[in-house]
Amino acid sequence: EQRFSSIEHVHHATKYPHDESFYFRFSVDGMHGGDPLVAKLAGGKLGAVHKKLTPLLRRPSHLTMDPDWRTKLHSYLVEAQLSKYRTHQHLRDLLLATEDAKLTHFIRGREAVVCLPLMLARSILRREAA
């Protein structure tokens, strides 16, 4: 099982599970593993041609995203959040301290999005702590 540096890395790696070598690039030991921005660029829509990426960091143009990725994304993100908060006690304590607050993801220039995977992970962690 691969380890990832951030949720952003998981988000983009899971788009390409059918190509093990490209999937590995997003892991802690892979070439995209250290920088969430590089992971976002390489895994995003323009990842095969993005000018900010050197040719080595670009996604191979023949790769296509898993057609079922969008339906699986929620479960991938819940599992990634659980892994993160089970690994880091101080972060788990912070998350649990939010109690039942609505947790949102802010993207500049857009409306905040309710972060359902994080809220579900919080609920699971709360049950585990009880």
Image (cartoon, helix red, strand yellow):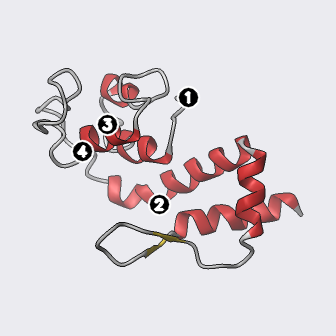
Left or right of 57 in this view: 124: right
* Residue type indicated by callout 2: His
* Residue type indicated by callout 1: Glu
At x 59% / y 79%, what residue is drawn? Answer: 102
* Residue type indicated by callout 3: Val
Q: Could you tell me which secondary element the residue under label 1 belongs to?
A: loop
Q: Could you tell me which secondary element the residue under label 4 belongs to?
A: loop
- Residue toward you, 75 or 100: 100
Q: Which mark is first along the chain, 3 or 4? A: 3
Which residue bears the numbered disc 2? 74
- Determine crowd level at label 2: few under 14, some 14-19, many 20+ residues with C-alpha closer than 10 A: some
- Determine crowd level at label 4: few under 14, some 14-19, many 20+ residues with C-alpha closer than 10 A: some
Q: Nearer the viewer, mark 3 or mark 2?
A: 3
Which residue bears the numbered disc 3? 38
Residue 29: x %, y % from top left: 47, 20
**Mark-to-mark CA distance, 1 and 3:** 22 Å
- Determine crowd level at label 3: few under 14, some 14-19, many 20+ residues with C-alpha closer than 10 A: many
Question: What count of labels does the image hold?
Answer: 4
Looking at the image, do the residues carrying marks 1 and 2 touch, with CB atoms under 8 Å apart? no
**Mark-to-mark CA distance, 1 and 2:** 19 Å
Q: Which mark is first along the chain, 4 or 2? A: 4
Left or right of 74 in this view: 119: right
Q: Quadrant of residue 112?
A: bottom left
Q: Where does the C terminus fall, quadrant-wise?
A: bottom right
Residue 41: x %, y % from top left: 25, 42
* Residue type indicated by callout 4: Met
Q: Which mark is first along the chain, 1 or 4? A: 1
Residue 100: x %, y % from top left: 70, 78
Q: Which mark is first along the chain, 3 or 1? A: 1
Looking at the image, do the residues carrying marks 1 and 3 touch, with CB atoms under 8 Å apart? no
